[in-house]
Image (tube, coloured by chain):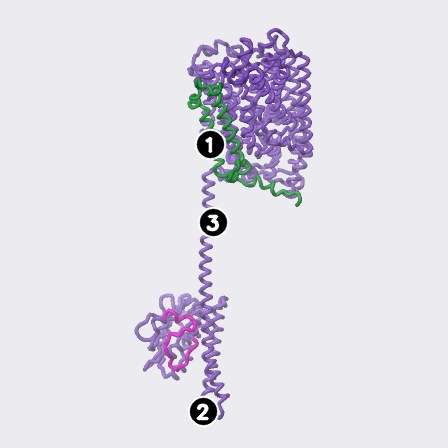
Amino acid sequence: MLSANAVLFISVLYVALLFAVAFVGDIHARNGNAGWLQSPVVYTLSISLYCTSWTFYGAVGSAARSGIEFVTIYLGPTLVFVGWWLLLRKMTRIGRLHHITSIADMISSRYGKSGSLAALITVIAVIVVTPYIALQLKAVTSSFQVISNSGSDVLSGFPQSDPDFRLAFWIAAGMAFFTILFGTRNIDANERHHGVVAAIAVEAIVKLVALVGVGLLVVFGIGNGLPELFGGTPPANLHYADVFGSSWITQTFLAAAAVICLPRQFQMTIVECPNEQHLRTASWMFPLYMLLICLFVLPIAIAGLNHLPEGSNPDMFVLTLPMWAGQEAVALLAFLGGFSSATSMVIVSSIALSTMLSNHIIVPIALRLPWVALDASGDIRRFLLNSRRISIALILLLGFLDFRLSAQSAALASIGLISFVGVAQFLPALIAGLYWREATARGAMAGVAAGFLVWVYTLFLPSFGGSFILSGNDIGFGPWGISALRPQALFGLEGLDPLVHATFWSMTINVALLVLVSLLRGQKPLERLQGTLFVDVFRTPAADTSRFVNRSATRYDLNLLAQRILGPDQAHQLFQEAERRHGLMRDQSLADDAFISELERKLAGSIGAASARALISQVVIGETISLYELMKIADETQRVRDYSIRLEEKSRQLEAAARQLTEANDRLTLLDSQKDEFLSQVSHEVRTPMTSIRSLSEILLDTEGIEREQAQRFLHIIHEESIRMTKLLDGILDLSVLEADEQEWQLAPTDPELVLDKAFRICEGLAVRSRLLLLNGPRLGDGRALVRCEPDRLNQVFINLISNAIKYNVSEQPFVRVTSSIDGRWYQVLVLDNGPGIRSDERERIFLKFSRGWAQTRSGTQGAGLGLAISGQIMRRLGGTLELMPDQGRGACFRVRLPLIGDGAAHA
Amino acid sequence: MPSSRPPDSSTAPDAAVALPLFGLFLLMPPLIGLFASHLDIGGVPLIVIYVFGIWAALIVCAALLARRLDPGHSDDADAAAPSVAADPRR
């Protein structure tokens, strides 16, 4: 037998070790080398505080009473962690981006930073978790009394006397001291407690070693292996299929909900998560931890049933079996394991609850009280720390009082499951918040509140067995004898296990109200914004909020606020970082929303989103949420549509650009070939006269005594050829000027008839020399038409056309007729001849350079072939046209057209 | 297990979703009721071996799958960008 003093001494020693570990962990983290504290293994171990003393002692008790059913409590969390990709990944990402401090904070943040929702969840969490804390105190106290029992009924596992409340009080006080010391050292923007995490990890190892130690002793120390064990007295139900009914499903569901929604689990899994990558390890390591914990539960239960006296307390088998076997060291280890699991649960639960209490109840109330001068100059930081310390003490005091009042109530496991049903009420609001954009704060409030009330009525009050509010009569026959209201057979639903019954009704009403109220009433803008940010957390970075919210505040006010909550050092650091990014700000300059949002998120990491928002809005000027921007992102289909429209537009633009490029390329290729052709034509044209000039001049030079007459003839030809070449070069120059010079010509209103008269007179001489009849008319007559043109250029065109007609007319009785008239809004001139005409295959090319449509000329001299090309260009520049009229059998007819200005006839 | 596939290959997230559903199917009635017989394997009841076997199998699958999944990687790449950009030597 171990003496009470020895056990007490070892317990105190163990507690001292925990303090040391926490202290070292804190020091390391403070010095910035928290490396091992942030490893995935430590993270996993800290999550395993899921296994409380209820697991440690109660699982064996449950196994002894109802066989394999106890594993449901671990299968639920296993499925949640194995399926981390679905839910936990999203929760940790949101937790990191929005600096979530607790489950109440996460739900209220999602529903538009609703302060009342956060307060409701906090109140429920305190009511639900306090009995759970009482349960841990009870477990530690009774295990201490069992192990230090010196009476004859030592192996029964029941404490000899009444619970030792003095011991329980000091345990509670010690835990409060530890929690206040390491849990409220500072207001951290990330709300992480490295010292606490270190201690929890050590405790996780201790409880695993303890339970495995007891298990190994049972299987290999006492008995001869598993077959013999299972051959003995097996627990009830081990072989019957009726275990696997509604109760199996319900318990698995409740455990899965609890591992997400229990404030302490949320604290460790989401809030204290240093790195999302750690989930990867925890996804299999945490289930593995639970598997190892459970591995020996059945053997211990069976051995207890086999060896310990009839009627022993199965909840204490873990402790009494080693004592029965005389292994006091193992018994002590088992005691420490139970102690560890209880303390770690109580410590983290009270941290989580105190954060919720101070952030969602105390600070919001203080902000509304005029005499708590938080909005003027008060030190919010110190106020927060103190409120948390008081909350921790208060929670543990509540737990102790609860234990004191209900010391003799039901078995351990049932209290645990009752609080599981309580926290499961958060699950619908949480899941809907993460995956359903339309869920509203009102819906969440209605669902959570109604589910909680149903839980109180159908499970919590009846668990007191008629001693609290509801009498035994009320439980059995319904209040006022209304049988439809029987707490354990609500609306006549009989024959179910009370736990299944309560879970069914509370979850049904919770989900139904959440969905109905959400569908009936719309969302507020902030709810919609937060909903979108949460649901689309993998698509919309939190920094994006600044697109939707318009507000500003002076740097001075923001700095003051940050200092009061975060302390001067952190605030200074924050502002320095911000100034590095946004540029230096003066005290009175206005900060934009990007910065305010960042500060709000940082503050939310300390005091929760709702309070942070309340504080920020005290210093902010003119806040509006841009509904238009919000709606734009809120609607997923709209977003996808926008995106595809943008894509289409872009591809259309690209197509158009490609088409333009292809066209440009074609044009360039054409121009290039035209240029090549032009060059070869020019050289050809130049070479012909050059050749004759050269050969004739050579003859003149070389031939002695050449006849004067012949020499005269040769010189004449040379002269002619030179003139032709000069003309050619003039033409080319003229053309290139016309083509290259894109300047607008100075066009003046002109009477085209006068210009035509002038051209006609010039050409008359040529006609006489060519013995050709030049016919004038019928003409429009002077002063009948007015066009906008440059008279010299127009004259050039007319001369070119008439002289061409003269030169190339080789018929017997040649004539050229020039007529002019008005055709609609156009002034037109026709130049008609009775020459050979243009060959049909030449008609296409006649206006190109160096093309001569005529086979032979009257005079025998060839033109350069540029005249029509130049004329065509001139007419184009004048805004008119030059065309070859359709072939009419004999001769050619060119038409010049120019648009009339005003009413030409007015000048008549 | 050496894997020839790149991490976060397209099938891994799907498998990560399917795994818990598969586990749920195996561990929930009616299927689990089939194994609650009086059969013993090496002295241990079949149902115990079944439950713990499935449990262990889920853990192994989750561990194998975890190597191929990257929670940091998601639809937005900018979450990882700042840490890459911050090079103290520059």
Residue A454 visible in the shown view: no
Predominant SS along the magenta part: loop
Residue at 44% from the left image edge and 26% from the top image edge: B25
Q: Chain of mark 3?
A: A
Q: Chain of mark 2?
A: A
Report whether residue A218 is seen.
yes
Quadrant of the snapshot with the C terminus of chain A: bottom left
To which residue does mark 2 refer? A709
Name the mark nearer the viewer: 3 or 1. Answer: 1
Residue A664 screen position, x and y as percent: 46, 60
Whether residue A726 sits left or right of residue A7 in the image: it is: left
How far across and down, in percent of the image, does residue A650 sit?
A: 47, 49
Chain drawn green in the picture: B
Which quadrant would residue A378 be assigned to in this image?
top right
Both labels 3 and 1 in a single chain = no
Q: Residue B18 — which label?
A: 1
* Amino acid carrying mark 2 in the image: Glu
Of residue A570 and residue A245, the one placed in the foreground of this image is: A245
For badge 3, the amino acid type reads Lys
Q: Which chain is purple?
A: A
**Residue under label 3:** A650
Query: Where A571 sits versus A129, above or below?
Result: below
CA neighbours of label 3 inside 10 A, class few (<14), some (14 to 19), many (20+): few
- Could you tell whether A220 is left or right of A822 in the image? right
Quadrant of the drawing holding the N terminus of chain A: top right
The image position of residue B11, as x and y in percent, is: 47, 37
**Which span of residues is magenta-colored?**
A843-864
